[in-house]
Image: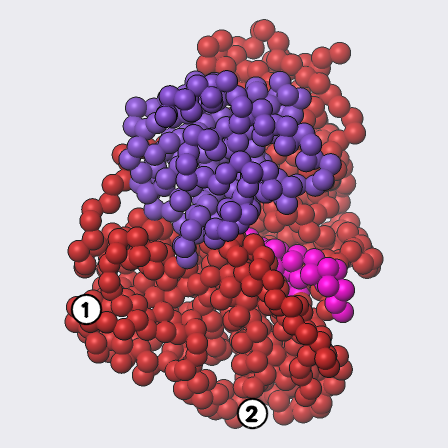
Chain colours: A red, B purple
């Protein structure tokens, strides 16, 4: 398999102020990666966007794609890798759960061209359903995982990972966290290398199509690979230990290492650190030699214990298992400082005794989802509202979101709740919501199941024609891909019909009165026919397509301050004036959509002509 | 130099921190920063950190920031919770104060609107603060940063804004008082 720079090309190194995601993307193009796939998900989204930008900037032939979900994204990258090309797939940590079926099997089959999977953890969590640790997942999946501490290191690790993956024919995971993904620093980058790898799928059904009989042999081979990689990691440059004597040592990785280092520098404290970049398979002799130097060793890592649990003899090891490090929440500097302070002589922290409130995010003014939720609640005040992942999850502020488990669960939970009540002879007042992109990601099997098991509930698909929350990426109905090229388009309505749904109505989400009537009609259909009814409430995202029609509104003096509009319509442009005790329109926020006119039960919000 | 910036999603905390970091670079200093993305953008509270100097982590420990900027008065307390004793807060508000620390309050929104550039409030606040906070990058570095970060058609109006803020009457009075 050929590799290496184009003959005679000189490498130009520059320093750029880049985010961790940008640095990772630059590493991908520097390492002559041929294929890059992803599904949007904070904090990983910018990785593929930056690869697409570098593709254009450097005129590279790399293939970039927003796939329909993370499993599909992984499979495409894996497939490119088994034809001998380098491939990368990026996702957030919960997306790894979706791709896991393929990852676990791929660890057994191995790869030919290098395959790297970037899975971004979110300690906090800032915008995720879990604080799960991709490094623990890697131990379970039996693949190596690298834990970068800085954007520069993330770039270097990408290049190292491709090489590691190829030499040992194994997928390799890179695990950045939110603060690295969205942190910016000066990064030294090199001109992207070029390499004309040709696709070549060499048949070997005993490997690529391995049936259970062959899987044992592949498993044994995998365990051998991990042993060899563990030994190799002893000398990896991403692991290094400070010299020096001390009663206490610290083992740390990732952003936690950066935080620990800054705290020790800032306080002039000398505690030797063992920084680990290759978290699994953990280079045990290196770690054990370090531990032997000290009376006690503190392990500082997040969001869970991946290094800590791999250490065999933990008699003198302190960490999450011993209660020295909190088991949930982000390891912000104040917490890391206190953790070290209980074990070493650091001065007391001087934290201002100030409590403050933060503003929760809300749907944008003019968002079609707000109108849709308002209409749904109006038609069904005592309803049960299973919902899903996207901008529309913010409908929770309007009392219109009762469940949010994971991608596609808006439909499956609607299905399950309906069945549970139906068993008792009751028709539960379920009106579920899901976004268009989420529907394509995971909702289709869910809807098929509902029809194929004669479940009965109302589903409203909120179609804003984009993946909005993550920064406006295209969907399967957009007809456009990550690099701007034109592609085929699916039809949402026909997909719903193809699932076997007979009651389908489409409407502009802004038509609150009509949508409300349709919800009632759909509920009646569900009650009488015991079948699923689907409404498609369409309105493009106003951040991308501002409304052409402007409807200027005002609140009349007769407003009685009942706050119905604030509670059930919840537009950030509607504000309560503490002095007059009346609601007024904040003109700096209002986008003149006019939707709030229907939000006042006594008609005090009127159009200004 | 550790700087905290608070505001609401969509107000420009990201752009503010990038200009600061770019200005630091023009003065030959290393910078590292972090931003809030995603959920918080929908009008929710956001916070950015900019650290100028030899730092590895982009996070700032509560009670250790050297300077804070607050782009929306409602987010001031959060900014103050990061400040070290006696460090200044620059807030976009007509007259905000807090007993725990030195507050420079300027209605940057009104001032920049007067100059026909209502969206320039953040830059106005930054330029206003430059002469009042010695650890921040110099005004020339901020000008360079604006040229490096914004599109060419936006240079003239924003550089004029910086001049106005830097030469603001209130600012000059404060500067004289400092010396």
Q: Nearer the viewer, residue B126 or A301?
A: B126
Q: Is residue A499 above or below residue B105?
A: below
- Please provide the residue range marked out in magenta: A37-61
Q: Is residue A365 magenta?
A: no
The tag on residue A246 is 1
> Residue A443 location in percent, x, y?
64, 55
Question: Could you tell me which residue is drawn at 43 percent across and 73 percent down?
Answer: A238
Rendered image quadrant of residue A75 = bottom right
Please tell me whether mark 1 sits on a helix, a strand or a loop: loop
Name the residue rendered at 70%, 47% in the picture: A466
Give the alpha-carbon distance from disc 1 to disc 2, as whole Å: 53 Å
- How crowded is the residue under tag 1: few (<14 C-alpha within 10 Å), some, or many (20+)? few
Report in which chain the residue with disc 1 lies: A
Does residue A291 appear to the left or right of A498 in the view shown? Answer: left
Q: Is residue A401 above or below residue A56?
A: above
Q: Is residue A531 visible?
A: no
Q: Which mark is residue A490?
A: none
In front: label 1 or label 2: 1
Q: In the rendered view, does A349 fall on the left or right side of A592?
A: left
Between A244 and A485, the residue placed more toward the observer is A244
The residue tagged 2 is: A213
Q: Is residue A58 magenta?
A: yes
User: Which quarter of the rendered picture does the N terminus of chain A lie within?
Assistant: bottom right
């Amino acid at each position: 398999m050929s590799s290496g720079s184009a003959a005679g090309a000189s490498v130009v190194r520059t320093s750029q102020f880049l985010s961790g995601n940008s640095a990772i993307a630059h590493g991908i193009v520097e390492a002559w990666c041929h294929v890059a796939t992803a599904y949007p998900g904070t904090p990983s989204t910018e990785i593929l966007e930056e690869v697409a930008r570098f593709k254009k900037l450097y005129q590279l032939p790399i293939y970039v794609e927003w796939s329909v979900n993370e499993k599909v994204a992984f499979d495409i990258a894996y497939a490119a890798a088994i034809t001998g090309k380098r491939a990368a797939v990026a996702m957030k940590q919960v997306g790894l759960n979706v791709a896991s079926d393929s990852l676990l099997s791929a660890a057994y089959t191995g790869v030919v061209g290098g395959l790297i999977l970037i899975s971004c953890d979110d300690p906090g969590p800032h915008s995720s359903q879990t604080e799960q640790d991709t490094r623990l997942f890697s131990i379970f999946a039996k693949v190596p995982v690298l834990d970068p501490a800085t954007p520069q290191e993330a770039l270097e690790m990408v290049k190292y990972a491709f090489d590691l993956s190829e030499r040992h024919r194994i997928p390799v995971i890179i695990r950045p966290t939110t603060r690295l993904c969205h942190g910016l620093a000066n990064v030294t980058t090199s001109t992207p290398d070029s390499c004309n790898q040709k696709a070549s799928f060499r048949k070997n059904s005993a490997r690529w199509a391995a049936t259970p009989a062959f899987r044992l042999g592949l498993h044994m081979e995998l365990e051998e690979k991990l042993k060899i990689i563990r030994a190799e990691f002893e000398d990896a440059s991403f692991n290094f230990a400070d010299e020096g004597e001390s009663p206490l040592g610290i083992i740390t990785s990732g952003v936690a290492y950066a935080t620990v280092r800054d705290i020790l520098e800032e306080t002039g404290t000398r505690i030797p650190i063992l920084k680990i970049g290759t978290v699994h398979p953990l280079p045990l002799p290196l770690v054990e030699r370090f531990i032997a130097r000290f009376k006690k060793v503190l392990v500082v890592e997040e969001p869970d214990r991946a290094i800590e649990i791999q250490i065999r003899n933990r008699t003198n090891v302190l960490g999450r298992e011993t209660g020295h490090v909190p088991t949930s929440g982000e390891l912000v500097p104040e917490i890391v400082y206190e953790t070290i302070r209980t074990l070493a002589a650091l001065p007391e922290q001087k934290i201002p005794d100030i409590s403050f409130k933060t503003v929760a995010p809300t749907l944008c003014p003019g968002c079609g989802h707000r109108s849709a939720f308002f209409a749904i609640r109006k038609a069904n005040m005592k309803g049960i509202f299973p919902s899903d992942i996207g901008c529309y999850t913010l409908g929770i502020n309007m009392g219109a979101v009762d469940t949010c488990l994971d991608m596609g669960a808006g439909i499956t939970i609607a299905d399950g709740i309906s069945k549970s009540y139906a068993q008792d002879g009751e028709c539960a007042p379920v009106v579920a919501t899901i976004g268009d992109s989420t529907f394509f990601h995971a909702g289709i099997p869910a809807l098929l199941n509902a029809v194929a098991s004669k479940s009965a509930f109302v589903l409203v698909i909120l179609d804003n024609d984009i993946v909005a929350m993550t920064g406006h990426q295209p969907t399967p109905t957009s007809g456009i891909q990550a690099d701007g090229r034109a592609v085929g388009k699916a039809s949402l309505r026909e997909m719903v019909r193809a699932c076997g749904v007979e009651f389908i109505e489409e409407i502009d989400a802004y038509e609150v009165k009509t949508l409300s009537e349709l919800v009632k009609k759909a509920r009646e259909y569900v009650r009488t026919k015991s079948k699923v009814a689907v409404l498609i409430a369409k309105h493009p995202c106003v951040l991308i397509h501002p409304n052409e029609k402007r409807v200027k509104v005002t609140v009349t003096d007769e407003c009685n301050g009942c706050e119905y509009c604030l509670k059930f319509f919840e537009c950030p442009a509607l504000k309560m004036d503490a002095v007059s005790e009346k609601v007024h329109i904040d003109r700096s926020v209002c986008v003149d959509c006019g939707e709030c006119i229907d939000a006042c039960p006594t008609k005090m919000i009127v159009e200004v002509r | 130099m550790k700087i905290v910036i608070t505001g609401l999603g969509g107000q420009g905390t990201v752009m503010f921190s990038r200009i600061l970091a770019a200005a630091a670079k023009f003065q030959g200093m290393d910078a590292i920063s972090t931003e809030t993305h995603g959920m918080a953008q929908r009008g929710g509270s956001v916070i950015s950190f900019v650290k100028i100097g030899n730092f590895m982590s982009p996070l700032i420990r509560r009670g250790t920031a050297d300077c804070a900027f607050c782009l929306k008065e409602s987010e001031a307390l959060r900014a103050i919770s990061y400040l070290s004793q006696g460090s200044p807060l620059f807030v976009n508000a007509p007259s905000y104060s807090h007993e725990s620390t030195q507050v420079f309050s300027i209605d940057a929104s009104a001032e920049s609107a007067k100059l026909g550039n209502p969206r320039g409030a953040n830059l106005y606040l930054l330029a206003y603060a430059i002469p009042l906070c010695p650890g921040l990058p110099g005004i020339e570095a901020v000008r360079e940063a604006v040229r490096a970060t914004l599109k060419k058609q936006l240079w003239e109006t924003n550089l004029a804004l910086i001049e106005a803020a830097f030469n603001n009457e209130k600012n000059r009075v404060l500067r004289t008082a400092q010396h």
